[in-house]
């Protein structure tokens, strides 16, 4: 057996050994799905079953694609195409368009909301920016669900003050504007690529000759349009491996449909189905909460702790607070205790349903001297202070010096205003300091003999792969942004009706989506999990989330009443 499989457990190895034909890997949270994907591809290359440049591994984020490429490189596999659906489609579109249309491919629209505003002007409509954003979201949903404007109009949807009829007219005006400007939007890239393969046999032959083996990560999140494009890439071939978890389908609002994963065995009756239910991330007590929440849900996997599962730092708890401010102060106080007890700030996350819940938290954490950063803002390498630092390091690489590499980097950062002592927690100054400090730590991790030029190149490679350094701050994140991440200590706040499930979630399907969001949040925790909610917003009374009742008291204990009292006292 190939040594590349030695690091896998029995179920993971079973999945990685299936190199031909359709296979679906149902991988629970923390079950090592990325490990399986990379080891399966590496095993196929080792066995001679795969030629690296004929393997297409599809992901949903550029960061995930970069991580796949990085892991494969570390295993000695170079040349595998790990891309997002959009990146793969855009590459094909740019390559084949001149041959098919005799002209360069249209440009990609850089701001859908601005274009929509121009289209609205042509109709003498004056919607505000937030309304235009909602219209843009409806356009995206219409396209990924493969509906025409006429089909969408029959749904009778309106956005704000824009009626269903006016909305259809605005969509048509937007498409006309793009055509006049020779522009495509993000979703058009997939539609145009699919249309080109369907209508041009020579394009279909060329694409299918290039890519012979397909792997799709997070398959529960594919839309109807992405799945159609995947089918066109495949043609009549059947070498496809899909990996996903129905319990982590949290993008239905964007067109994701878990049915593609759940019905995989029906579409491919001879498909091999492998279940990965051994969790390598979380303590058994945390898994108990997750399993209780998803008990008897369609497609739910039952997570079992691995032999190497971390020990729980404390039993999972649920605590009720009198109001939002008290909840925020108590969470900040508990985080301060963890930090004083030796935990690193980067090991702690506070998760919530919507961004609006972070304001009180940021205030309370800053008052406690706790450094925190909201996830989902600008990417690390797009931050102005980081871009400035990378440029300065590249410039310093050409200047001769007798200083050591580490001293050179430190001097460059000091020249940009970096100090040894951190500013007070909270605010832009602290955020900039943390970003520069992360670059300094990266410099300290370089091998002996590192040079400024080599370090600058390494930073640029990291930026391309979105391989961001660890920030030594507490993470604040929405549940959507937290997917795919993990922390030893997780606080999940706002477990009340109206927040989770959110107030506009109506009907069984929408509530199920909210339950899956809660599941994603719970399964981010490794060693400790603290759930909490506030009885009042100051104006309105709240009740505990129905999900707390579904979990039950068998896996959760009541939080410390003294902490609640302390929070009330402020």
Image (cartoon, rainbow, N blue to C red):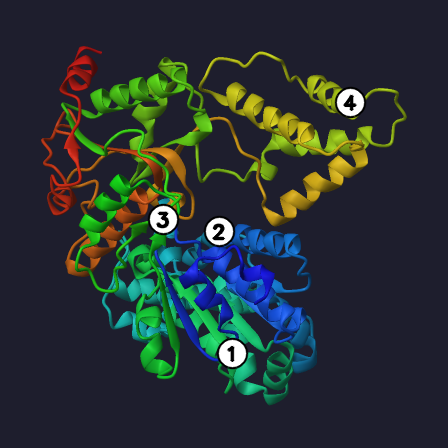
Residue 452, x across and y down, in percent: 79, 32
User: Of residues 553 and 373, which is closer to you in this image?
Assistant: 553
State the quadrant of the N terminus: bottom right
CA gap, disc 4 and disc 1: 52 Å
| Residue 113 seen anywhere in this rendered image of the structure | yes
Distance from label 1 to label 2 (Cα)? 47 Å
Disc on res. 114: 2
Q: CA distance from mark 3 to mark 2?
A: 50 Å
Q: Is residue 524 left or right of residue 78?
A: left
User: Which tag is nearer the camera, tag 4 or tag 2?
Assistant: 4
Which residue is tagged 4? 408
> Residue placed at 37% from the left, 74% from the top?
148
Residue 414 image offset from top left, x and y in percent? 70, 17
Crowd band around label 1 with a 10 angstrom C-alpha radius: few (<14), some (14–19), many (20+): some
In primary-sequence order, the first of circles 1 and 2 is 1
The residue indicated by pointer 1 is 20
Classify 10 Å Cα crowding around label 3: few (below 14), some (14-19), many (20 and above). some
Residue 185 visible within the image: no
Badge nearest the viewer, 4 or 1 = 1
Say above or below: 314 vs 426: below
Whichever of callouts 4 and 2 sits on the residue coming sooner in the sequence is 2
SS for dot 1: loop
At a point 53% along the width and 19% down the height, the residue shown is 429
Mark linked to residue 306: 3
* Residue most extreme to the front: 1
* Residue 507 picture location, percent across and down: 15, 58
Q: Earlier in the sequence, mark 3 or mark 1?
A: 1
């Amino acid at each position: 057996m190939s040594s590349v499989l030695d690091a896998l457990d029995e179920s993971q190895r079973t999945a990685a050994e299936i190199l031909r034909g359709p296979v679906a890997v149902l991988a629970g949270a923390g079950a090592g799905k990325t490990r399986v994907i990379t080891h399966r591809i590496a095993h196929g290359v080792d066995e001679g079953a795969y030629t690296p440049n004929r393997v297409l591994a599809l992901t949903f984020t550029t960061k995930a694609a970069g991580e796949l490429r990085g892991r494969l490189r570390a295993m000695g596999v170079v040349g595998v195409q790990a891309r997002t659906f959009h990146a793969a489609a855009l590459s094909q579109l740019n390559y084949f368009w001149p041959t098919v249309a005799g002209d360069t491919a249209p440009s990609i629209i850089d701001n859908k909301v601005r274009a929509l505003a121009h289209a609205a002007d042509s109709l003498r409509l004056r919607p505000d920016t937030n309304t235009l954003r909602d219209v843009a979201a409806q356009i995206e949903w219409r396209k990924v669900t493969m509906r025409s404007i006429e089909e969408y109009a029959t749904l009778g949807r309106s956005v704000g003050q824009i009626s269903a009829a006016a909305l259809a007219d605005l969509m048509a005006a937007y498409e006309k504007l793009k055509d006049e400007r020779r522009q495509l939007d993000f979703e058009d890239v997939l539609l145009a690529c699919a249309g080109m393969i369907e209508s041009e046999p020579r394009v279909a032959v060329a694409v299918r000759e290039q890519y012979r083996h397909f792997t799709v990560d997070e398959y529960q999140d594919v839309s109807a349009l992405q799945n159609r494009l995947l089918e066109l890439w495949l043609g009549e071939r059947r070498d496809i491996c899909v990996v996903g978890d129905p319990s982590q389908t949290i993008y239905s609002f964007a067109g994701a449909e878990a049915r593609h994963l759940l019905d995989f065995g029906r579409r491919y009756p001879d498909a091999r189905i492998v279940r990965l239910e051994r969790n390598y991330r979380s303590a058994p007590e945390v898994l108990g909460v997750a399993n209780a929440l998803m008990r008897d849900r369609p497609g739910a996997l039952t997570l079992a702790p691995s032999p190497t599962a971390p020990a729980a730092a404390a039993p999972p708890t649920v605590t009720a607070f009198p109001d939002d401010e008290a909840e925020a102060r108590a969470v900040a106080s508990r985080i301060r205790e963890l930090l004083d007890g030796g935990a690193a700030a980067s090991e702690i996350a506070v998760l919530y349903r919507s961004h609006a819940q972070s304001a009180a938290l940021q205030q309370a954490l800053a008052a406690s001297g706790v450094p925190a950063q909201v996830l989902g803002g600008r990417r690390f390498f797009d931050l102005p202070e980081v871009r400035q630092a990378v440029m300065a390091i590249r410039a310093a690489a050409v200047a001769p010096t007798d200083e050591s590499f580490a001293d050179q980097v430190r001097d460059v950062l000091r020249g940009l205003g970096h100090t040894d002592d951190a500013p007070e927690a909270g605010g832009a100054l602290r955020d900039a300091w943390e970003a520069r400090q992360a670059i300094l730590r990266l410099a300290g991790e370089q091998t002996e003999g590192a040079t400024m030029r080599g370090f600058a190149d390494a930073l640029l490679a990291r930026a391309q792969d979105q391989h961001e350094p660890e920030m030594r701050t507490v993470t604040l994140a929405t549940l959507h942004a937290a997917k795919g991440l993990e922390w030893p200590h997780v606080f999940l706040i706002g477990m009340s009706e109206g927040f989770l499930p959110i107030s506009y979630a109506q009907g069984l399907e929408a509530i199920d989506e909210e339950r899956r969001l809660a599941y994603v949040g719970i399964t981010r925790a490794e060693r400790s999990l603290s759930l909490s909610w506030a009885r009042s917003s100051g104006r309105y009374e709240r009740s505990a989330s129905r999900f707390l009742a579904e979990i039950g008291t068998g896996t959760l204990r009541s939080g410390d009443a003294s902490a609640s009292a302390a929070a009330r006292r402020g």
